[in-house]
Structure formats: structure tokens, C-alpha cells
Image (cartoon, rainbow, N blue to C red):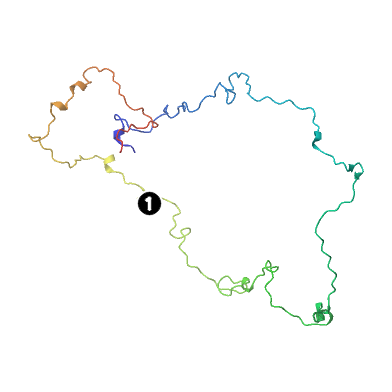
Amino acid sequence: MQSDKYWVGTWRPHKPRGPVAALYGSPGPKYALPGLIGSSHHDPTKCKAPVFSFGTRYEKANSNLSPGPTYLIPSNITRRGRNATPAFSISSRSKQPLLFRAPGPGQYSPEHSEKLIFHSPPAYSLSGRTKAWSASQSPGPATYTLPPMLGPKTAVTSSSPTYSLCGRNKNGSFHEDTSKTPGPAAYKAVDPYIYKEKPPQFSMTGRNFTPGEAAQKPGPGAYYPERVTFTRTKAPSFTFGLRHSQYTSPFITDMES
């Protein structure tokens, strides 16, 4: 909150009782009108003269669009193909193809063919778990639970009646207030001085003493008889104060160094 030294007179900011012109005023010169000069951002409500641009002169188009002597046809090219002697290029020698090598007796393992020819018992290898079975998550033994045998929630056996310890319910109990009537404390006691005679009352204040010689009395300079307007007419007067608006910045005179 601003200090009182920034305000002139006895007026202080308060909530207006009705609409104030400063609250609903126009924004002023914030929005500029479109210009009337030039072709860009011209006012559409005003007439606009024809405009011309200062550009370069275009060159005359050439009607002859043939490629000219840019393409040179070799002399040994005829309508039937190339007419020249056989020519060869100088390149590296190609590698000779490898001969077919038939597999020898050591390439075969006849001891591994017993499972296909003779009966063999099942064999298992110690290898890592394959990734194909990782997606198949079958439930383990802890997933299944048997029904309980103790308590009231038994599904296969009979149980004796059970009771729970809970708080007292106000609905349906012996102390339930079905009429919902207010009690004596719901009414405020009326002051008897309102409907009966009221005796005189006195307050305890400080003792008043008669002013003596040491008491401070106002002198002749404390009075302003020229400001008296009750016994004679007064000319209209005006003050130069701030406009009463919440958008007006205060006039600050004390500047901190």
C-alpha cells in the first residue's frame, strides 16, 4: 500500500460506487490508422492510385532454340551402328576359377548317424535358456491358493457365527434424535434490557482537572479568521490535485540515491 505522503488532499483510493470513465476509456493512440501513401498497408477505405515498379528491362526472347554445334557426332557412327576395327582395353588379368574339390573321408562323421539308424535313449544338453520360451510365462506354484479353513470366509466348511468390534451407529440406536428438534443451547438469550426498563449506565473515565497556568493554551496564531466561511459568502476555489484514477502513477519526490 502506498504512503499518505504521495497523495494530495484528504482523498484516498477507494472502490468506486459506479462506473468510472477511466475504466472504460479508449486506448488512445495505441492503434495507428493505416497509411495513405505507398502500396503496402494502404487504407482500404480510400482511393489508391496505380503504382509501377522500377525493374530491369527483359532481354528479347530468342526464337532459335536449336542446340547448335554443341553436340559433335563421331565420324565412325552410322545408321547401322559403329563402323570400326576391333579395339581392346588394357585391364588387369582375371583370376583363374578354382577347381572343384571333392570332400575327403575325414569330412564325414558316421558316428553321428546312430540316432537316425539305431534306437537311442533321450539325451539332454546343458545350454542357456532360449528366447523363444521367454514370452510364455506360465503361472508358478505360488499363483494358486487354497480356500481358507479358519474364519467366516470358508468356502468348503461350515463356520460358527462371528462378531466384529465396530463403533456405535447413530442411526437406529437408543440415543437417535428422530425429531431433530433444537436444544436449549441452540437459542441465544435475549438481553432483558430490550423488553424491560434499562437502568442508567456509567463509564469509568479519567478525572477531569481544571486547566491551570501550566496548561498549554492556543495562542493568537492558532486561529485563522480569514478562513471562516459560515458567516459570509465565499468565492469559488479550485485545487490542483491528482486525477482520481487507479491508472495514474503517484508523484514521487523522494528519490533514493
Identify the amino acid type marked 1. Answer: Gly
Whether residue 243 sits left or right of residue 42 in the image: it is left
Taking the image as shown, residue 142 lies to the left or right of residue 226, namely right
Q: Residues within 10 Å of mark 1 (few under 14, many from 20)?
A: few
Residue 250: image quadrant is top left
Quadrant including the N terminus: top left
**Residue at x 29% of width, y 43% of height:** 191
Query: 196 and 69: which one is in front?
Result: 69
Q: Nearer the viewer, residue 129 or 227?
A: 129
Q: Position of residue 132 (x, y in %)?
A: 70, 68
Local secondary structure at mark 1 = loop
Q: Quadrant of residue 209?
A: top left
- The quadrant in which residue 72 appears is top right
Of 12 and 68, nearer the camera is: 68
What is the quadrant of the C terminus in the image? top left
Taking depth in this image into account, of 36 and 167 the one nearest to the observer is 36
167 to the left or right of 3 = right
Q: Which residue is mark 1?
A: 183
Compared to residue 246, the image places residue 141 above or below, namely below
Q: Residue furthest right?
A: 80
Which residue in the rendered view is the most extreme toward the left?
A: 213
> Would residue 191 be visible to someone looking at this image?
yes
Tell me if residue 129 comes above or below residue 222 in the rendering: below
| Above or below, comparing residue 46 to residue 132 in the picture | above
Q: Is residue 146 above or below residue 22?
A: below
**Relative image position of residue 57 (x, y in whole percent):** 68, 24
Number of residue marks: 1
Does residue 195 show up? no
Residue 2 location, x and y as percent? 33, 37
| x and y, in percent, of residue 13 in the image | 35, 33
